[in-house]
Amino acid sequence: LTANSFFLLAAGMLGPIYALFVKDIGGDILAAGSSWAIFMIVAGLGIFAMGRIQDKIKKDKPVIIIGYILQSIGFLGYFFVANVFQLFIVQILLGVSMVIHLPAYDSFYTKYLEKGKFASQWAVWESVYYTTTGIAALIGAFLVKLFSFKFLFLIMFFWSLVGLLIATQLKEKIEFK
């Protein structure tokens, strides 16, 4: 939860002001919608397929790490985006990062759930998700108002690196059959 919280913090800082960034690089409302659609469709279709693949992979941690690395690179990629086409490329990369890490993360987290407490323990994850993303939205807006989108992207990248560092310390649960 802690490692993922830093990625939620990083991603959540851009969410509500994303369209303003797209406008800053010369895009319009269609570019904002299209780029977000690219991310969501790549992630959505890929996650479905990756879930089946992840069921066959014995260890979740390395897959989570690879996904987090790609997500960090994607956050840094925003820093270099100068036009809508480049944004589409970053959105594809971020979609692929979700494809890779989400099924593995969900598998990893599920293995640690206590029998009889599934609802409350998934509720902890959901609570962390919404609370962290809400706080991140406010922080992101302040950072862009006070500094710039470029500064925000560096902060997003930094927080994702913190999450990545924490994720490298994850311990795989040993399952006995």
Image: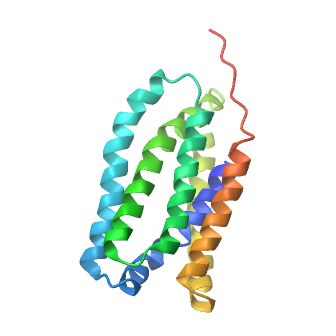
Q: Residue at x 32, y 67 (%)?
A: 35
Q: Position of residue 13 (x, y in %)?
A: 56, 72
Q: Residue at x 50, y 60 (%)?
A: 74
Pick whichever, 125 or 71, lies toward us.
Answer: 71
Q: How is the image coloured?
A: rainbow
Q: Quadrant of the C terminus?
A: top right
Q: Residue at x 43, y 81 (%)?
A: 21
Left or right: where does residue 75 sit relative to residue 81? right
State whether residue 44 is above or below residue 138.
Answer: above
Pick whichever, 84 or 135, lies toward us.
Answer: 84
Q: Residue at x 47, y 42 (%)?
A: 100
Left or right: where does residue 163 sit relative to residue 80? right
Q: Position of residue 73 (x, y in %)?
A: 54, 58
- Farthest left residue? 30
**Would residue 95 be visible to someone looking at this image?**
yes
Q: Position of residue 115 (x, y in %)?
A: 63, 26
**Would residue 135 be visible to someone looking at this image?**
no
